[in-house]
Image: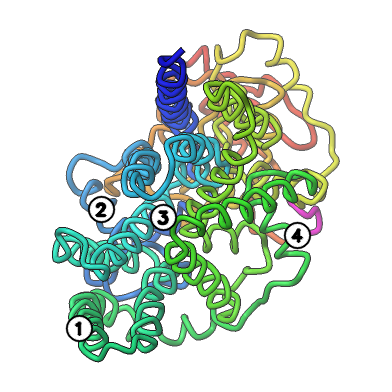
């Protein structure tokens, strides 16, 4: 009888460890699955365009009209000059950062939260649709989320004079500078600790303690501000007008804030959102009973960041995905408190060893209610398409509701009769924006692999979402050149599909499109007569050439 509690505690701890380990494994899978086949879309092209048209000086001294990440673009340029840049290399830093977050979060707060809460937290981080998506996207958000989290915890440890205070202070400065250089939007979150602890120090009555705190803030501020000025002053000076135009452009509304909250927690159901908010509030109360200063600190940073970004009114902030990704550093802390609330909810279970299993079941149900299961079919090379990521409720997603209603060409339906992933199509021309990419819809029907055909110079010269066949340093696997196909290189593909007109969301949108009809005779002269033709596409069979 005396050993029963110890046995129960052992089973509980083992359950927590298993939950955390399984969650990390699931998180790695969700972030890595089919990543090597993903086609670069939308904002992922900002850095590509910059490195194609600029040198190092041009990259480090501008934020660009379409803001690219300066350090990432330098990394991409280095790879392009030394062996060739690939899609996998573009995605790798974000993948590693997304995986590292699953380990760094519980490790840094291992003394601040209970084992069950840490395990549940890892599960929520692992299945978070927003964190999964941005870990798979060649944009800096997964890295900045990790750096911002480490920075604010390091600041707290340094200011509270825990062991290795100087090391924590250095860690804070490095993470804040690098995160801010990667993306300016992180700076409200990572710099607000100065305001929080300055206000706290001013309330202290002990003069020496207050003076010591102010000295720490000054030293840490200088260690952060000087390198920030070094890396940010040149692009600020060159891009001041562009930044001014982007600020004050748009604003959030009650409806957009509500939809941002849904996206933040990775769900479409108002009832589930209410449950998540309630669990978050319960978790904050429970954590505050142990450490009210931590909850106050995190709450100040999260609320201050949300207000600061909303007050800046950047472009497109009314779109839920934009505000949600700008608030990404807030998400790990929100999920921590949701996990704390969930642990409190299952605390009544007896024996306590059942609690980890209940938490695991809750995570599985939450995952099933989210968007990820809907886009994990194989092959799906467009998981980052706005159809899946703009809003997690299809009824509120314009990339679902406002698409053209034309029937899918019969050619794609015929491909569905073949085994999945047994054929490869080259689709041309294209536009890099989700507004004009029908391929995710078609691929869900035909289940074959896709490559994008770049039509320069065969169908006119284009440099938006295209690049020359040689001399660029780009070695993308899923982008091929029509000029090379006409020269006899088929890239192992089975069909070339030429799109006569653009597919537009909404259907009345204006978009530049090559004169495909004018270049079809040139293509037919090399590849022979089309094997399929309708009002929207012309298909050439490449298998004979291959």
Determine the CA span between mark 1 and mark 3.
Answer: 31 Å
Magenta segment main secondary structure: loop
Determine the CA span between mark 2 and mark 4.
Answer: 35 Å
| Residue 490 visible in the current orientation | no
Q: Is residue 87 above or below residue 296?
A: above
Percent x, y for residue 509? 75, 60
Q: Which mark is residue 145?
A: 3
Q: Circle 1 is placed at which residue position?
A: 212
Callouts 1 and 3 close, C-beta under 8 Å: no
Label 2 SS: helix
Residue at 43%, 69% (x, y): give it: 189
Left or right: where 170 falls relative to 432? left
Q: Is residue 184 above or below residue 456?
A: below
Q: Earlier in the sequence, mark 2 or mark 4?
A: 2
Determine the CA span between mark 2 and mark 1.
Answer: 40 Å
Residue 283 within the segment the image draws in magenta? no
The residue range painted magenta reads 503-508
State the residue in front, 183 or 219: 219
Residue at 33%, 59% (x, y): give it: 153
Percent x, y for residue 59? 29, 68
Colouring rule applied to residues: rainbow
Left or right: where 247 falls relative to 199? right
Q: Which mark is residue 238?
A: none
Q: Which mark is residue 75?
A: 2
């Amino acid at each position: 009888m005396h050993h029963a509690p110890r046995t129960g505690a052992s089973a509980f701890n083992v359950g927590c460890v298993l939950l955390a380990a399984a969650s990390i494994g699931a998180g790695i899978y969700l972030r890595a699955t089919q990543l090597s086949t993903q086609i670069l879309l939308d904002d992922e092209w900002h850095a590509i365009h910059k490195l194609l048209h600029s040198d190092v000086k041009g990259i480090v001294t501008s934020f660009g009209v379409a803001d690219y990440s300066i350090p990432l673009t330098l990394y991409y340029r280095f790879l392009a000059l030394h062996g060739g840049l690939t899609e996998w290399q573009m995605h790798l830093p974000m993948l590693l950062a997304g995986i590292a977050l699953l380990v760094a979060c519980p490790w840094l707060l291992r003394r601040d939260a209970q084992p069950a809460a840490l395990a549940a937290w890892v599960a929520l981080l692992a299945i978070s649709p927003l964190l999964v998506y941005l870990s798979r996207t060649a944009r800096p958000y997964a890295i900045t989320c990790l750096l911002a989290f480490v920075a604010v915890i390091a600041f707290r440890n340094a200011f509270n004079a825990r062991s290795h205070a100087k090391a924590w202070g250095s860690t804070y400065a490095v993470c804040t500078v690098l995160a801010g250089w990667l993306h300016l939007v992180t700076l409200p979150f990572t710099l607000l600790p100065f305001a929080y602890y300055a206000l706290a120090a001013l309330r202290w009555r002990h003069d020496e303690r207050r003076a010591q705190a102010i000295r720490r803030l000054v030293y840490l501020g200088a260690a952060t501000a000087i390198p920030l000025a070094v890396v940010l002053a040149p692009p600020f000076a060159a891009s001041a007008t562009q930044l001014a135009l982007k600020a004050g452009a748009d604003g959030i509304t009650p409806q957009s804030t509500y939809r941002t909250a849904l996206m933040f927690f990775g769900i479409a159901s108002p009832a589930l959102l209410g449950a998540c908010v309630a669990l978050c509030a319960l978790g904050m109360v429970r954590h505050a009973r142990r450490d009210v200063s931590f909850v106050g600190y995190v709450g100040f940073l999260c609320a201050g960041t949300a207000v600061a970004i909303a007050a800046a009114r950047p472009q497109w902030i009314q779109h839920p995905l934009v505000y949600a990704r700008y608030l990404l550093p807030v998400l790990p802390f929100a999920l921590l408190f949701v996990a704390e609330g969930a642990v409190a909810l299952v605390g009544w279970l007896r024996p306590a060893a059942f609690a980890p299993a209940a938490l695991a079941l809750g995570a599985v149900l939450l995952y099933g209610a989210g968007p990820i299961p809907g886009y994990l079919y194989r092959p799906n090379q467009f998981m980052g398409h706005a159809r899946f990521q703009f809003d997690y409720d299809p009824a509120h997603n314009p990339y679902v509701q406002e698409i053209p209603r034309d029937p899918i060409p019969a050619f794609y339906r015929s491909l569905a009769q073949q085994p999945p992933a047994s054929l490869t199509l080259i689709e041309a021309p294209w536009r890099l924006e989700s507004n004009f990419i029908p391929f995710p819809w078609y691929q869900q029907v035909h289940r074959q692999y896709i490559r994008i055909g770049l039509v320069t110079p065969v169908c006119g010269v284009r440099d938006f979402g295209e690049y020359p066949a040689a001399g660029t340093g780009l070695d993308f696997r899923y982008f091929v050149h029509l000029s090379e196909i006409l020269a006899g290189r088929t890239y192992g593909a089975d069909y070339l599909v030429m799109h006569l007109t653009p597919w537009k969301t909404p259907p009345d949108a204006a978009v530049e499109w090559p004169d495909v009809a004018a270049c079809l005779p040139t293509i037919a002269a090399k590849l022979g007569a089309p094997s399929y033709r309708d009002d929207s596409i012309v298909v050439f069979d490449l298998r004979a050439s291959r």
